Amino acid sequence: MKKYEAHRLIENFIKGAPDLNPCAWDDFTSVKHRSPEVEAIRLEILDIEERNRADKKGHWCSEKGLAELQVLADRLKEELVQEKFIGVICGLKSEAAAVEASVDRSKIRIGVSGANAARAEDLARGFCEQGASAILSVGVSGGLDPALKPGDLIIGETVIADDGSVYASDKYLLSSLTPALSRESGNPSTSTNMDPRFRGDDRGEAAIRTKIATIFGADDIIESAQKKAALFANHGAVAVDMESHGAARAAAHAGAPFIAIRAIADPADRALPPAALGAIAPDGSTLVFKTLGAALRDPKQFPDLMKLGADSAAATKRLRRDLGPLFAALMSALDL
């Protein structure tokens, strides 16, 4: 656990929402942490509890204790504001792992929304309040443009929300990527003049491309090829996810730079199998046993689930391969 995650947990506990997991608070306060910084926070919390025993049944501590806990949260927030960082919003834990594996972790803070736009907005808002230099939406997306294949990379030029709102990515951040992601003038299409690292290698990966274009942010799962086709036709968006619009909305409200980096998983012509529709937990983990159970009740879904798994693996591989140089360019632009 990192300092900013401990701060988020304390804030959520005070609000009465222990970070979506009812055991999270107990786990945090009862287990010694390897990070000396986080362990010092835990011990301070335990001291607050010890000095302010609960005066009501079922309460963690007294009202005075909660007030002291808020003072601690405010102090941590002030400390966090002093540190320059990029706030990264992911929908899934697997996406967050790809970011952590590719990027200097000391310069980022990651929030996992569980593929939920409201949660993504809340996380991004928290990062903005901590003074984030920029907000990034990073992860996998569903393809809307029939020309896109699993593993293609999309840099969001704009994000269109379900309610019709349009959020533009920061032009300076976009321009900072042009040495690697230069595009043909006048049309946000596949570049033939980009850094070789993003074109694919000499073994035939040239089909893996990067495109600067519009992303659609959906509040609900876009599960059918028909719905994907409608979004492509009506909005011109090439990819869809469930957190970019929430993150973009919070960034716009705070006046923070925003950009989205997404890799295509399921292509435009592929529907999501029903067993996959409830596969994501609120904390961004995959509900493996629930998904397998649904598939066992309808074994015809297994081939489609295997295809989806392969698509997601291709997208995650692309993120792990390319996020390093992309973030390096963004950090240089933001003087981090």
Image (cartoon, helix red, strand yellow):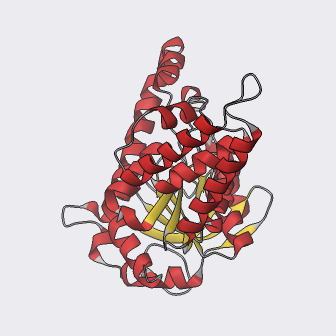
For residue 277, which quarter of the picture? Answer: top right
Q: Is residue 19 above or below residue 104?
A: above
Whether residue 259 is visible, yes or no, is no
Q: Residue furthest front?
A: 51
Q: Residue 94: x percent and y percent? A: 42, 44
Q: Residue 37: x percent and y percent? A: 41, 54
Q: Is residue 335 above or below residue 219?
A: below
Q: Quadrant of the C terminus?
A: bottom left
Residue at horizontal 74 percent and vertical 43 percent from the top: 64
Q: Residue furthest right?
A: 163
For residue 255, which quarter of the picture? Answer: bottom right
Whether residue 333 is visible, yes or no, is yes
Q: Is residue 114 above or below residue 59?
A: below
> In this orientation, which residue lies closer to the viewer: 230 or 123?
123
> In this orientation, which residue lies closer to the viewer: 11 or 248?
11
Residue at horizontal 46 percent and vertical 44 percent from the top: 93
Question: With 157 as the anchor, is 117 left or right in this view?
Answer: right
Residue at horizontal 23 percent and vertical 66 percent from the top: 201
> In this orientation, which residue lies closer to the viewer: 28 or 150?
28
